[in-house]
Amino acid sequence: MKVLVAMSGGVDSSVAAALLLEMGHEVAGVTLRLWGGDSDSGCCSVSDVEDARRVARTIGIVHHVIDDSDLFMDKVVMPYVRAHIDGITPNPCIECNRHIKFGSLLERAHRLGYDAISTGHYARVKRNEDGSYALLRGDDPLKDQSYVLSSLTQGQLRSLLLPIGGMHKGEVRKKAASLGLSTAGKPDSLDVCFINSREGRGNFLAKYADLHEGEIIDSSTGEILGRVDAVELVTPGQRKGLGLSGGRRYALSVDVAARKVIVGSVRQAYEAGLQLRGITWTGDGWEDAYRNGGKLLVQTSAHGRVRNASYRDGLVIYDEPERIVSPGQTVAFYSYDFPAMVLGSGIVDHGIAENEIASVRGLVNTARQ
Amino acid sequence: MISYLDHAATTPMRDEALEAMMPYLYSYYGNPSGSHSVSRQARDAIEDARQRISVHLGCDPGEVVFTAGGTESDNLAIMGVAKARSGRVLCSAFEHRGVLAPCGEVGATLINVDHDGLLDIGHLQSLLDREVSLVSVMLVNNEVGTVQPIDEIARLVKASVPQAVLHTDAVQAAAWMDIASVTEEVDMISVSAHKVGGPKGVGALMIRDGTPYTPLLRGGSHERSRRPGTHNVASIVGMAAAFDAAAKEREVERKHIAELRDYFWELLSTIPGIHETAANRSTKAPGVLSAYFDSLDQQDLLMLIDERGVCASGGSACSSGAIQPSHVLIAMGYSAAQARGAVRFSLGHTTTKEEVAYAAEVVGSAVTQLRGN
């Protein structure tokens, strides 16, 4: 096959490219330039482009650099800013995967005559007997990245090769070293690539939007407990950074328009379920299978714990109450019977409190049984 | 087959330049600043090169300052004048980044350019007041090839603000024009060797005697302290040889390349949805043919034709090799979408009819493939 491998300059995508070549594919590398500003690491700094170019030269493949910074601004950065203005904490990596890597890059690869694209994600794509494709967790439990790929659908999975999904990180580093790749010892990239640590999230957002001071209000007494510099930066579920003394207080909800952060006790920082929007399914069959609801596993952060839950019609009800998940975060669905298999994803619209469960119980009855 | 249509980025070396350089890479290794016989060989070569370059630049040999290339020459000109004299700096909106970036640093005002790729003289006039200390307008634009009316610009500047310094970036002009014909009108000229068949990493800045200028680099007294640092002897010799050869061949090459460009366009123009930018050939140097393709991403097209050996370029390549929409076309009033679909083909002294015919065929089939999917 003719494969275009997205090379970030890191060790994972470098090894992915080398493995594809060993498998006999016709391979070309591409590095995306997405962000012109400062960055600590990640996908976009010039030095990473240089790393990718060096790797491509070492293994002997053609390397291209594509500038998709306008689209990145449009589909990832500005939505990230707007979400914060609305009191929502989004996951930009997932939006980048959806719109850039497995959106515009995949379309571009097809236009240019490639059969598939490839990345260095720790996840697996398996071809089923009926010709459909399944997305599975990576074999390294510490590195599994299926969560950030959970919004992919059949059309994308069909044209995706994930060569390192069956490997552990240690094996990947060893492979890189044995190939003499300069990226073998490079640290993993962390955090949002377009925000650097010197600047921080607050200063970054302040360049694009007005941030507002707000009151911290006790959910039970209505008392004003303190103030925050920017309500936009508070995430439901957060405890640190609220500047409150005394007992442990958690942000329960944020009302940006009213400039209020509602806080409560740890007991109150749990919720019974989540109302989701933007549901996607990895397989066309899953949508049908869950039309009348059913049990599944959910994961609400990249390497978070897996919880048992019931699902129906965009509503997730946990078997046991769980800590608050901020609106805007992605929830990945996994199969109850085959826990490594990704079923789909949704984005948290709002949480469902334990005392609200009665009103939605009718809806989930069938699911929870 | 390789069809190299990126001469505006850099040109293959001329034989004359390479041959002239060889002895200075090995046999004549002296530091031209020394006082002994080995040094003198190198110094003689530098002074000979300076004399020959001064003929091409139409100035006194002492007004030629050797630099490490076009971007350095531009920086020295803008920053050097800005340091020596306070006042407002003007530059055209579609200068090369070697001028735009230092101009940005000194808070310059941009002079508009029109849709045909020519300086908006009316706008320049409206910006000229007693505060203006420096005006920089390129002689030939690097992306669309238009020749700026530097004599008209010079007359206007000198009439309105006699003390203002006029700089022109002639990096792209040197291969196609007799620069000496405009020298009388300007105070500073930037040129680079590798655009005329010389080596990379060497250029010159003509600084008219009496021009306010403060050096940026400090060190020895090389180049009359205007640009200290041990000379790149072999490259300077190569530059002089390249300029000599280019001047000798100029009339023949101009005619030949203009014919090839016209033939190339004849072939390209049959591709649906292709539009030449700055299409008026009478105001253009013959080397550049810039066009945009409707609803096409230049990055896709360049990657596809590269696979088949056709070398062209998009907007300005940044250091990482990625292509960003051309600020030149944006300044000329093209939309971002049009700029993103633009490709610059540039022909030069080695270009053949076979190369342009092959390129036209490859571009045509690439466009068909990209539109078909």
Image (cartoon, coloured by chain):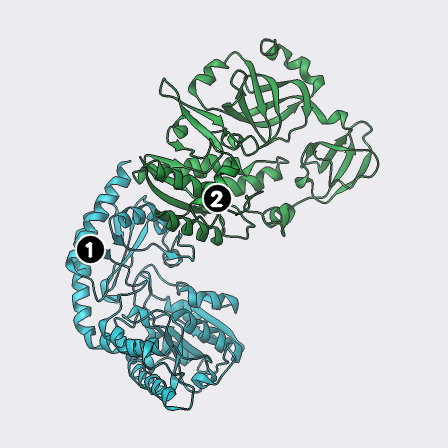
Chain colours: A green, B cyan
Q: Is residue B269 visible?
A: no
Q: Secondary structure at mark 1?
A: helix
Picture quadrant of residue A311: top right
Q: Quadrant of the C terminus of chain A?
A: top right
> Where in the figure is residue A295, as x and y percent of width and height?
56, 14
Question: Which residue in the rendered view is the most extreme toward the front?
Answer: A178
Residue beneath the point at 50% across and 24% down: A344
Q: Nearer the viewer, residue B169 or B323?
A: B323
Picture coordinates of residue B146, whole percent (x, y): 30, 65
Nearest the viewer among A190 and B10 is A190
Would you name the residue on which mark 2 appears?
A11
Q: Residues within 10 Å of mark 1 (few under 14, many from 20)?
A: some
Which amino acid lies under the numbered mark 1 shown in the image of this protein?
Answer: Trp
Q: Which residue is mark 1?
A: B265
The chain that hosts pointer 2 is A
Bin the neighbour count of mark 2 within 10 Å (Cα to Cα): few under 14, some 14-19, many 20 and up: many
Q: Nearer the viewer, mark 2 or mark 1?
A: 2
**Label 1 lies in what chain?**
B
In this view, A121 is above or below B354: above
Q: Are marks 2 and 1 in contact (CB under 8 Å)?
A: no
Q: Please tell me whether mark 2 sits on a helix, a strand or a loop.
A: helix
Q: Quadrant of the N terminus of chain A?
A: top left
Figure quadrant of residue A19? top left
**Distance between the Cα atoms at labels 2 and 1?**
45 Å
Residue A122 in percent (x, y) is at 49, 34
Circles 2 and 1 on the same subunit: no
Q: With B268 as the anchor, is B296 left or right in this view? A: right
Task: Residue B331: give x, y in percent of width and height.
Answer: 39, 58
